[in-house]
Amino acid sequence: MKKAEFIAQVATKSGLSKKDTEAVIEMALETITDALVKRDSVAFLGFGSFTAVRKEAREITIPGTTKKVQVPAKYSVRFKPGKLLKEAVV
C-alpha cells in the first residue's frame, strides 16, 4: 500500500477530508521522527514501538573477496510489533 492509498483509506474510515487526513498523518510521522532524532522511543500500546538503536563500528569482509572494510558507528530505527499486531497478522 502506498502513502496515497493509506491516506484515502484513513480518510474514508474517519470521515475526514483527504487533505485533513494527509496533514494529520504528516504531523504524526514528523513527531515520530523528531522523537527518534532525540533518541526517545515511541510506543503505541498493542501496535508496537519505535526505538533508535546505536550500531557500533565494526569491520566487515566483502563477500567473494578478502577485502576488509570499516563500517562506522551509526544509529538505526528498530520497530518491535506489539502483541495485538502480531495476533492480527497471524
Image (cartoon, rainbow, N blue to C red):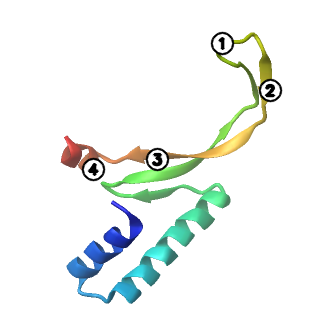
Residue where numbered disc 4 is placed: 85
Give left or right: position of 58 versus 6: right
Neighbours of disc 4 within 10 Å: few (<14), some (14-19), many (20+): few
Q: Compared with residue 65, is residue 3 higher up or lower down, i.e. above or below?
A: below
Q: Nearer the viewer, residue 47 or 61?
A: 61
Mark carried by residue 70: 2
Residue where numbered disc 3 is placed: 79
Cβ atoms at labels 4 and 1 below 8 Å apart: no
First in sequence: mark 4 vs mark 2: 2
Cβ atoms at labels 2 and 1 below 8 Å apart: no
First in sequence: mark 3 vs mark 2: 2
Give left or right: position of 18 versus 60: left
Neighbours of disc 2 within 10 Å: few (<14), some (14-19), many (20+): few
Marks 4 and 3, Cα distance to the nearest angstrom? 12 Å
Cβ atoms at labels 1 and 3 below 8 Å apart: no
First in sequence: mark 4 vs mark 3: 3
First in sequence: mark 1 vs mark 3: 1
Which secondary structure, mark 3? strand
Give left or right: position of 58 versus 9: right
Which secondary structure, mark 1? loop
Cβ atoms at labels 4 and 3 below 8 Å apart: no
Q: Compared with residue 78, is residue 25 higher up or lower down, i.e. above or below?
A: below
Residue where numbered disc 1 is placed: 64
Marks 4 and 2, Cα distance to the nearest angstrom? 37 Å
Could you tell me the amino acid type at mark 1? Gly
Q: Nearer the viewer, mark 3 or mark 2?
A: 2
